[in-house]
Amino acid sequence: MRTQVAIIGAGPAGLLLSHLLHLKGIESVVLETRSREEIESTIRAGVLEQGTMDILTETGVGERMKREGALHHGIELAFGGRRHRIDLTELTGQAITVYAQHEVIKDLVAARLAAQGQLLFSVSGTSIEGVETDKPRVRFMHEGEQHTLEADFIAGCDGFHGVSRPAIPDSKRQDYQRIYPFGWFGVLVEAPPSSDELIYAQHERGFVLVSTRSPTVQRLYFQCDPKDSVDNWSDDRIWNEFHTRLENGDGWRLKEGKIFQKGIIGMRSFVSTPMQHGRLFLAGDAAHIVPPTGAKGLNLAVGDVKRLAQGIDDFYRSASEAGLASYTEQALKRIWRAEYFSWWMTSMLHTFEDASPFQRQIQRAELENVVNSRALSTALAENYVGAF
Ligand code: RFL
Ligand code: PHB
């Protein structure tokens, strides 16, 4: 088998890259370990920045997002028994859309298949060879047979646990990492949204996020011990925790409903550099992870592949390797800003068990500063909508 760009991973990064390359007349093959059903039903991100909405719309895969996604013009920060609105649109002129990641995946898969794109699901044993030559290869098993896919480039879009990042020798890589001492307990609930906008709530018992998925489904998270098990949490215990952390006697009440999905996720900040080794390029979670508090992961993946597609297009169109050579440096500018913002939101809103009384007061003062200063509210809003 031969193609121009071998793409490992059919997450948002891999599928969007394949779609962008196709629009530029460049062939690719996408290899994915999971089945189509699995990738189209895994619950993950929900917030799309304006730039992400724009690229999906401009490239013809944004129609359903426009119809079914919910445009949000603000978010709320809750602490000390009060809620404070950050007016994203007034402060930045931009907005965000709440539209589930797996819906983006469905739209991209449909677009690739409609264009006879090659997506191979349920592959196994993926390995990468020859990235230091101009004939890199991916070996993999598909439907019981061993295959070798030869390409001009390999795009490693296989997430944090994939094979692409480890294919860059340790001696050539530098990793930066912070693991947080807490996780998020996430639930999906059959109930209409409790709030028109997302609520990021700080409470001494821990952080809570109130998000939505659709007019009939709420997405809620609360800070938990990352080693806890969902089996320890009955629905009653979950609702008690949410009510205690969110309600303050002003009459507003979180809407309950049937909890139909529960899960615990760990939280880390991570960046691996460089994002290129020979003909192998990393994009999305394969190269970097942010804690979900800033809602940046999917949006960063989109930013990476937009840049990578442009670099690959320059290579074929004008034999210029300049775009590809500067991929890491250019991508990292945006990535580190998002790493900073995600770390900042996480630090400001979560309860750190080992924080001293002094640190707790400073954390509260920081929140007061953010909601009472137009300059700081604007900085938060600019970062949240991705206006940088
Ligand atoms: P993905 O989505 O992990 O996709 C990688 C794909 O590669 C496949 N794969 C392989 N395929 C072939 N061979 C191999 N050896 C392979 N190894 C792995 C995997 O099966 C998978 O299909 O990475 P990608 O494309 O870089 O996309 C990144 C985003 O998925 C991620 O950053 C976001 O989900 C993060 N995130 C959020 N991001 C936002 O922008 N806004 C949000 O509101 C938001 N909320 C979240 C989130 C992530 C969460 N979790 C579960 C970590 C909320 C949560 C709870
Ligand atoms: C979500 O809806 O899943 C979501 C929203 C905002 C975040 C993280 C997750 O910051």
Image (tube, grey):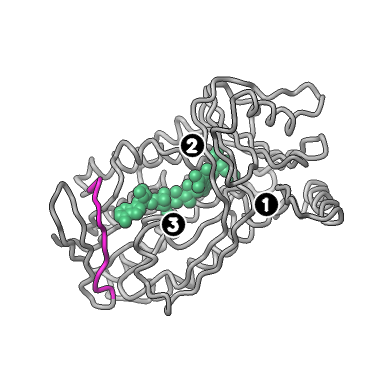
The front one of 12 and 165 is: 165
Q: Which mark is residue 99?
A: 2
Residue 52 appearing in the image: no
Asked if residue 60 is positioned above or below residue 365 in the image, the reply reads above
What residue range appears in magenta? Answer: 119-131
Residue 70, horizontal then vertical, whole percent: 53, 33
Residue occupying image coordinates x 34% and y 61%: 163
Disc 1 to disc 2: CB gap under 8 Å = no
| Residue 122 among those drawn in magenta | yes
Magenta span main SS: strand
Q: Residue at x 34, y 38 (%)?
A: 38
Relative height, residue 187 to residue 216 (above, below): below
Q: Name the N-terminal-most of marks 3 and 1.
A: 3
User: Pointer 3: what residue?
Assistant: 160
Mark 1 and mark 2: Cα distance apart in space: 21 Å
Label 1 crowd bin: few (<14), some (14–19), many (20+), radius 10 Å: some
Identified at 21% across, 66% down, the residue is 151
Amino acid type for the residue under numbered disc 1: Met
Q: Give the mark nearest the N terminus, 1 or 2.
A: 2
Which mark's residue is nearer the viewer, 3 or 1?
3
Front: mark 1 or 2: 1
User: Label 1: which residue?
Assistant: 345
- Mark 2–mark 3 Cα distance, whole angstroms, equals 23 Å
Looking at this rendering, what residue extends furthest in the front direction?
A: 232
Q: CA distance from mark 3 to mark 1?
A: 22 Å
State yes or no: Cβ of the residue under disc 3 lies below 8 Å from any atom of ligand 1: yes
The local secondary structure at tag 2 comes to: loop
Asked whether mark 1 lies closer than 8 Å to ligand 2, one says yes
